[in-house]
Image (cartoon, coloured by chain):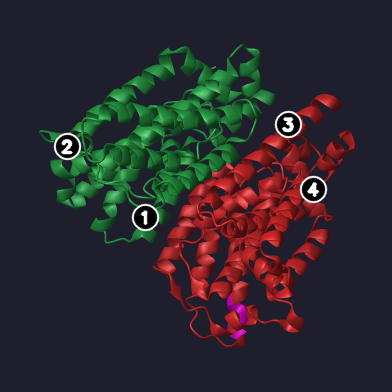
Chain colours: A red, B green
Amino acid sequence: MSTLATLARRHSWLPPLIVLLLLGAIIGILRPSTFTGDQINIKIAAAMTLILIATGETIVVTRGGIDLSIGGILSLTTAICATRGDPGLTESVFWIGFVLALGAIVGVVNGLIITFGRLQPFVVTLATWSILEGCALTVLPAETSGVPKSWVDLEHAMPFGIGVPMILLGILIVLWAWFSRTRVYNEIRAAGSNERSAYLNRVSVLGTNAWAYGLSGFFAAAAGLYFATQTGAGHPTVGTQYVLPAIAAVVIGGTNLMGGRGSLMGTIVGAFILTLIGDVVFLLKLQSYWQWVMSGLILMLVVILTALTESRSNSGNGG
Amino acid sequence: MKRFSPSPIFLAYVAALLLFALVSVYSPGFANPAHVGTLVTLAAFIGIVAIGQTIVIVGGGIDLSVPWILNSAAILVTALAHGQNWPLIWIVPLVLLIGCGIGLINGIGIALLRVPPIVMTMSVNVITQGLLLIVTRGFPPPLAPQALTFIAAGKVGPVPIILFVWIVLAAAVVIMERRTAFGRYLYALGSNRTVATLSGVPVIRTTITAYAISGTTAALAGILLCGYSRQAYLGMGDPYLFTSIAAVAIGGASILGGTGSYLGTIAGALVLTILNGVLPIFRLDAGALKIIYGLVILLAVFIAAPSLRELLQRRRGSK
């Protein structure tokens, strides 16, 4: 028992992984045909927007902040993608680079406002979320298809029977394995766990904020790009549907909302849990609204369990 | 203990008045009594939801469950009353109790189980939404009873009846903030939880009460809002998440807690409503409104933030 608890504490993504395996088992029993290559590609494709947007949120939450503006960046990116007409190769490369850079820049601006104004991330990013969503509605007043066909085709390509989403997921995991060992990430963690002592150890509050929110903006833009090419359409208000699930995926994945500790593996597992709950509800022939109730309950359960193990470990270790 | 600075609140009122005066000069119809009545009515809905949000934020938390508590209350009232007036005598108290109960669940999770407020209220919001949709199966309930429409949309001479309701509630909240033990506990709790606990503030009881009040005011707003729009519909509460938090932020309260007053929130609700009313006059669309909302919130938090003044004081103090 105690070894299990220690294991769960050291690898915060283990408990959510167990939940994911349970969900997988339920789906496997109810519809055994799920575990074919095609189906797995489809599931990853369905979860990928959430995974990408939650990746950025994981970094910000590890920094001890929160980023709501990712919803606005996602909306704005899909709006920009859907209004590009029929670009050639050079133009395509330019615009894809442009939206990713825009996301990163907006994120850095968030970080600067929060640091220099000594303001609460929640309110600042709530405000920038509103501004960005407003920009999205100005660029594209209503949902329309119009994402360049070449981009959509590229996203739906299946080299060697492996979907682009699966390749993206692989790249993401490899990149994270590298990033989580970098100095930048360690400083983000240090500043998230205790800003004051990190500052005294020459960790830059400004630098870590700029990196964390900048990366968050970048990944939100990547999620928007992915979403637009996946659906072939621009959705100027879709971001609203992703902000809270992104935070939920991060929290279910075992990342501490107080900062200082984060796990992308956990977040990926969390995003898959939130995506698969819909399948389970469908297969159990429940009303689709049960999806909301179940995701809320799982979220609450995970957090209560984390809080309980944490208070026990705090009182046990005594420092 | 009570760090109360009147200047941001004063500025919020000045902003509301200036905004109103400017628009009235540009478009004389803006200041006619009927239109002012409409503005006040719309501000009252934001104001009533924001009662709970103010109390929760002053106590150092946040309530994201407001939208679907409001929506549930509206749907329950219309579904139970079937358009008749007399059953409201027991339905309204019952629905307020249900709102209070959902708030209690929030408070218990946050105070006793130590779940972070964002996660707790977010899960409760999603679960409430799911349960409501399951119960109603997504069908719209019947029309709201006449009596509710009378209270929410009726007028005595040129003065909307709901203004009286709002004034009474506002007076009660301000007295509670300044004259009751609960008010003092709330500011103490929001300023510093540890210090509050050590100085004998009943932290758990205060937190739970704050969220219970928030659930009740959200339910009250839902009851009145379905009277105003003559029916309840799904999604009617969604805009109030943003506006209630924005009203508190514009009113000068820090999301960190411990500062602010409901007087400021009232000004915040007025600013938001006037901005909303300005749009059609300048032929601006929804996107522009969102951009303006975001900019106004940023401006307000910059003015209210302790960043400049306190930073200087702290530096002086430490040297």
The residue pinned by badge 4 equals A14
The local secondary structure at tag 1 comes to helix
First of labels 1, 2 by sequence position: 2
The residue pinned by badge 2 equals B154
- Marks 3/2 same chain: no
- Marks 3/4 same chain: yes
The subunit carrying tag 4 is A
Binning the other alpha carbons within 10 Å of mark 3 as few (below 14), some (14 to 19) or many (20 upward) gives: some
**Residues drawn in magenta:** A90-95
Q: Residue at x 78, y 53 (%)?
A: A184
Quarter-of-image position of residue B32: top left
Between B54 and A3, the one lying in front of the other is: A3
The local secondary structure at tag 4 comes to helix
Between A142 and B95, the one lying in front of the other is: B95
Which quarter of the image is occupied by the N terminus of chain B?
top right
The subunit carrying tag 3 is A
Could you say which disc has been placed on residue A308 in the image? Answer: 3
The residue pinned by badge 1 equals B289
The subunit carrying tag 1 is B
Above or below, comparing residue A238 to residue A9 in the picture: below
Q: Residue at x 78, y 63 (%)?
A: A173
Above or below, comparing residue A245 to residue A64 in the picture: below
Circles 1 and 4: CB atoms closer than 8 Å: no
The subunit carrying tag 2 is B
Is A91 magenta? The answer is yes
- Marks 3/1 same chain: no
Structural distance between the alpha carbons of marks 1 and 4? 44 Å
Residue B26 drawn at (x, y percent): 20, 52
Magenta stretch, overall SS: helix
Structural distance between the alpha carbons of marks 3 and 1? 43 Å
Structural distance between the alpha carbons of marks 4 and 2? 57 Å
